Image (cartoon, rainbow, N blue to C red):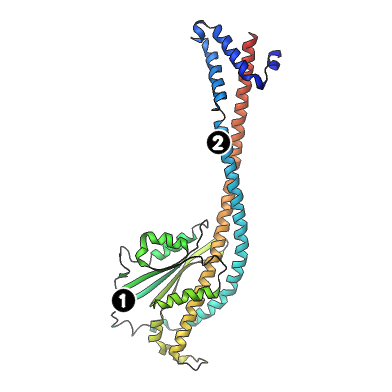
């Protein structure tokens, strides 16, 4: 016990050196043969301790623990920010739903089977279809953007290098950087217009009007809006909403003769105004639905990331404690072995 008390952590090197010299001097051939095993063990242990190899794994685990802890703090903060934005966006979205539904209900009550019966024959130019794909500008929101882009690809002609295929001209208008990046790799030839930073500020009706004017400027025969419909905080449904083209409605303006309009304009002009208003309102509703879905998906994704970071940190803490305990036990065994060698 006196030998153990005489050996402190500050004199470990001296104890190791003395123990190695003692063992090697008592072994024929300078530590060769079977008796040199203890000396070789002490020598290798001393070199590992001095070189820092033994503590390399502990340092790596400790650095990884710090990184994961920082990531957990970031994801938790992003979850709180997304939850705060979700409340405001969902409030605006709930107010806009009746506004968009009332306009949509008017067109849903029309006898759509009669539309286009006279205009499909004798049309020389190809039918123009515009796909409006609404995505977010930022990631870390689950698979909401991927689902919308996958749904939009289903309406694109397969293997076509030109927007015109089988008498139908298909163009894409993308709202959001994520949709542009996802569709540009395979469908860049179909692009006409892209918008970015639409969701940087809260979505407003003037923003929807600007985008709707760009849609009307392309004079499509059919408009299909792709977006994520908000169902709950953990469920967002990819949705495609078709809108009738202005030319098709103008050619069938007689369908509206049964309706009374409180206006001095003729039915064709009223039809133009109603169509422009419908495009703006439906686009505004889709933008709000997608913005709400984005924040809900990001909140859910960051919550899962925070949970995973906490679980990984617990596992690494357990691993770190085990390795640290093993290192301490090994050092104590070597100190006792060195002290015993000195006593001999």
In the structure shown, which secondary structural element does the residue marked by tag 2 occupy? Answer: helix
Q: Position of residue 205 (x, y in %)?
A: 54, 75
The residue sitting at 58% across, 44% down in the picture is 68
13 w.r.t. 306: above or below? above
Q: Let me know if residue 256 appears in the view.
A: no
Mark 2 is surrounded, within 10 Å at the Cα level, by few (under 14), some (14 to 19) or many (20 or more) other residues, namely few
27 w.r.t. 54: above or below? above
In the structure shown, which secondary structural element does the residue marked by tag 1 occupy? Answer: loop
- Choose top left, top right, bottom left or bottom right for residue 340: top right
Q: Let me know if residue 65 appears in the view.
A: yes
Q: Position of residue 186 (x, y in %)?
A: 36, 60
The residue sitting at 37% across, 86% down in the picture is 251
Task: Work out which quarter of the rendered image holds the C terminus and state it.
Answer: top right
Task: Work out which quarter of the rendered image holds the N terminus and state it.
Answer: top right
User: In this image, 222 relative to 42: left or right?
Assistant: left
The residue sitting at 30% across, 67% down in the picture is 162
Q: Nearer the viewer, residue 57 or 245?
A: 57
Q: Position of residue 95 (x, y in %)?
A: 60, 74
28 w.r.t. 331: above or below? above
**How many discs mark residues in the rendered view?**
2
- Choose top left, top right, bottom left or bottom right for residue 9: top right
Q: Which mark is residue 225?
A: none
Q: Which residue is mark 1?
A: 126
> Which of the two marks, 1 or 2, is nearer to us in this view?
2
User: In this image, 195 relative to 205: left or right?
Assistant: left
Q: Which residue is mark 2?
A: 60
- Choose top left, top right, bottom left or bottom right for residue 218: bottom left
The residue sitting at 66% across, 21% down in the picture is 10
């Amino acid at each position: 016990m006196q030998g153990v008390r005489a050996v402190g952590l500050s004199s470990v090197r001296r104890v190791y050196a003395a123990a190695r010299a003692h063992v090697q001097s008592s072994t024929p051939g300078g530590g060769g043969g079977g008796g040199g095993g203890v000396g070789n063990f002490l020598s290798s242990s001393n070199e590992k301790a001095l070189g820092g190899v033994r503590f390399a794994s502990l340092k790596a685990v400790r650095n990884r623990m710090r990184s994961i802890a920082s990531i957990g703090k970031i994801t938790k903060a992003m979850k709180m920010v997304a939850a705060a934005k979700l409340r405001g966006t969902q409030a605006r979205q709930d107010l806009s739903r009746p506004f968009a539904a009332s306009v949509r209900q008017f067109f849903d009550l029309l006898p759509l089977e009669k539309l286009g019966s006279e205009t499909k024959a004798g049309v020389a130019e190809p039918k123009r279809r515009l796909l409006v794909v609404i995505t977010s500008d930022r990631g870390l929101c689950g698979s909401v953007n991927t689902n919308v882009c996958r749904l939009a690809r289903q309406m694109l002609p397969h293997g076509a290098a030109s927007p015109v295929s089988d008498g139908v001209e298909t163009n894409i208008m993308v709202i959001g950087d994520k949709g542009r990046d996802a569709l540009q790799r395979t469908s860049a030839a179909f692009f006409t217009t892209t918008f970015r930073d639409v969701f940087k500020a809260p979505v407003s009706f003037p923003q929807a009007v600007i985008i709707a004017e760009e849609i009307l400027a392309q004079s499509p025969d059919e408009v299909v809006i792709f977006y994520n419909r908000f169902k709950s905080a953990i469920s967002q449904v990819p949705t495609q909403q078709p809108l009738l083209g202005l030319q098709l409605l103008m050619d069938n303006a007689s369908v509206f003769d049964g309706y009374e309009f409180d206006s001095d304009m003729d039915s064709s002009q009223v039809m133009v105004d109603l169509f422009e208003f419908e495009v703006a309102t439906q686009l505004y509703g889709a933008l709000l639905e997608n913005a709400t879905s984005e924040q809900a998906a990001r909140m859910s994704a960051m919550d899962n990331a925070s949970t995973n970071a906490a679980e990984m940190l617990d596992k690494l803490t357990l691993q770190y404690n085990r390795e640290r305990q093993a290192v301490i036990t090994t050092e104590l065994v070597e100190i006792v072995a060195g002290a015993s060698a000195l006593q001999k």
